[in-house]
Amino acid sequence: MPSDMNWQRTAMRESKSLGFTFYFTGWFESILFLKRLAFAQCKVGFQGTSLTLIALAFFTGCTHLGPKTITADRFDYSTAIADSWKQQTLLNIVKLRYMDLPVFVDVASIVSGYSLQTGASVNGTLSSENAIQGNYLAAGGQAIYIDRPTITYVPLVGQKFLRQLVTPIDPKNIFFLIQAGYAADFVLGLTVESLNGVRNRSTIGGTIRAADPGFVEALELLRAVQAAGAFGMRVLEDKTKTSTGVIFFRRDDVPSEILEKGIEIRRLLKLAPNQQQFILSYSPLRGAENELAVTSRSMIQIMAAFASFVDVPQPHLKDHSAAPPLEDLAQEKSQNKVRIYCGKDKPGNAFVAVRYRDYWFWVDQGDWQTKRALNAVIFFFTLGESPFDEKLPLITIPAQ
């Protein structure tokens, strides 16, 4: 009989009984002990081998917990962060319409820790043939699963973040988006105030200013030229490693109608008619013959322009808690432009919805223009410089 098992012999009514109790908390100890139990049963003639083999098979089939959590956690957390970014951006756009302070909170880090603890107990009595109490075997188990995520939130404040909000977007980054495949009329209509002095629609000063006819027409032509592959951008670096964006119009292997549209674009934007490439520069005024002067918007300007398309409940207009609608806005909405709806009840089919001042504001799931514009606003935040210079703290999590 194995010497390392705690056996106790007890005389009971002219019979011999054998009792044992053991506990274990580790996989290795459990497997070793159950193997010894099977050996002991063979020695004493106890017919409980099947239960022992089942338990032995259970404990030897251990697997790793960590790899199985990656698929679920990675997509769940990314979806939650994306949804919260949409809601936060929409809420701040609505708050600008109410002259409220926009506040941004970023998710700095997510650390998800898991712990799985198991334990089991088995006790029983092996009796002789004439014993009254008979044979007895009892088993018990315990499992503790702990999911302990640590999420760090950081409010975006300080001089660097303020500069990111009020500093105009670099014109190179705007045209990089166009080069990446975004529609030229959409990107430029959302991010620039003027091109070479030709002005876009603006809401500066709380009043609407319609876009110059030449601006709208130039964007439509630019999209057609972009779709034909006759418009592009490259970046040049000088000896001081300063990068300069250069846009160009192709001539080779381009249909004649596209060449004519390129000529018309240069006329509308007051560019040199025979110049094929232009250096991008930030300026509200017309540049040199080889320059395309771009007056780009800041993030706060983009969001303020977006806020002009927010529907405001009549009670909030009557008590003057929200800015009144701009003139000519009703006509723009009728042309299927950007629109943010409002209502008392939570919408059932919304791309994103937020609650503010007892009303719901949302973007309709079928309104692809507004969805695209909202996603672009979120994406433009990534074009700015991160407001954090310091590295995130190193967190060490012990294995449990």
Image (cartoon, helix red, strand yellow):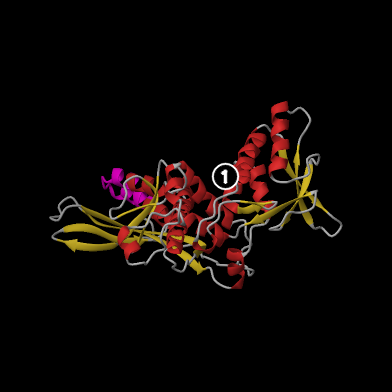
Q: Position of residue 128 (x, y in %)?
A: 20, 53
Q: Position of residue 211 (x, y in %)?
A: 57, 49
- Residue type marked 1: Phe
The answer to whether residue 19 is above or below residue 211 is below
Asked whether residue 68 is drawn in magenta, I would say: no
Q: Is residue 200 left or right of residue 65?
A: right
Q: Which region shows up in magenta?
A: 35-53
Residue located beneath label 1 in the image: 186
Foreground residue among 254 and 331: 331
Foreground residue among 211 and 386: 211
Q: Position of residue 68 (x, y in %)?
A: 46, 48
Residue 391 falls in which quadrant of the image? bottom right
Foreground residue among 298 and 87: 298
Classed neighbour count for the residue bearing mark 1: other residues with Cα under 10 Å, few (<14), some (14–19), many (≥20):
some
**Secondary structure that dominates the magenta span:** helix
Q: Quadrant of the N terminus?
A: bottom left
